[in-house]
Image: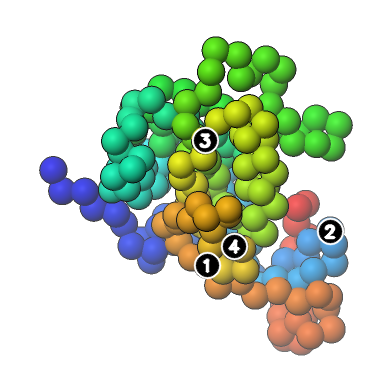
Amino acid sequence: MVQLIPSSEAVMQMLKRTGAYREGHFVYPSGQHTPHYFQMPLAFRYYDTARVLAVALSRLFRTDRDIASLLPKIAVVSPSPGGIPVAFGVREALSAEQIYWAEREDGDRKFRQWVGHGGVNPCVIIDDIVRSGNALHETFALVRELGADIIGCGTIVRFNSAPKEIDGVPIKSLVEFETKSYENGEDCVECREGAEIEQVRF
Ligand SMILES: [Zn+2]
């Protein structure tokens, strides 16, 4: 079987086509301006696109002998609800045994109560997009609290401003995206060009 992993360009085309990647002039609640915006769940609205992206991501782990050798006794973990469709798709493609996701509760990232009962397999942490790496750092800590090993980490898109690895675990990705942003409107190229602003929620 040929194990093809789509090119970064092909993945970006899918994200653009589904509206998950937009170009324009965006302003965050923080006041930051950017000429690009990712809203990954828009790509996961379409089952075919969701499946292609998850299978592609899963192949980065299939080709990792240390991880492949542990299958199916691994767990796929999502740092947040946004990563759940990706985590389920990757789990399915790998036939991994377990799946977990964290959620925000009173401002903190947490797993549901008693989730670690029965034992947690070695974990692969999967997200849709890694912007700063904070969500991954917090999830690494949560998984360690459960007493589980972290054997891999991956995302569809990784901003080049995010770390390449966490605690020696490389962050595998289908796209490495070169980000551009401005602290405020003063240096923003799009502002200077008079481009219409789209306010984004986060
Ligand atoms: Zn601007």
Q: What residue is shown with label 4?
A: 163
Q: Residues within 10 Å of mark 4 (few under 14, many from 20)?
A: some
Mark 2 belongs to which amino acid? Pro
Depth check, front residue: 102 or 151: 151
Q: Is residue 55 visible?
A: no
Please tell me whether mark 1 sits on a helix, a strand or a loop. Answer: strand
Residue 51 shown left or right of residue 39 in the figure = left
Q: Position of residue 19 (x, y in %)?
A: 54, 54
Q: Residues within 10 Å of mark 3 (few under 14, many from 20)?
A: some
Mark 3 belongs to which amino acid? Asp
Image label count:
4
Name the front one of labels 2 and 1. Answer: 1
The CA distance from mark 3 to mark 2 is: 36 Å
Q: What residue is shown with label 2?
A: 29
Depth check, front residue: 29 or 193: 29
Q: Residues within 10 Å of mark 1 (few under 14, many from 20)?
A: some
Q: Residues within 10 Å of mark 2 (few under 14, many from 20)?
A: few
In the image, the residue with mark 1 has its CB under 8 Å from the nearest atom of ligand 1: no
The CA distance from mark 2 to mark 1 is: 22 Å
Name the front one of labels 4 and 2. Answer: 4
Please tell me whether mark 4 sits on a helix, a strand or a loop. Answer: loop
Q: Position of residue 58 (x, y in %)?
A: 36, 42
Q: What residue is shown with label 3?
A: 149
Of the numbered discs 4 and 1, the one sitting upstream in the chain is 4
Q: What residue is shown with label 1?
A: 177
Determine whether label 4 and label 3 are within 8 Å by CB. no
Mark 4 belongs to which amino acid? Pro
Please tell me whether mark 2 sits on a helix, a strand or a loop. Answer: loop
The CA distance from mark 4 to mark 2 is: 24 Å
Mark number, residue 142 = none
Q: Is residue 180 above or below residue 58?
A: below
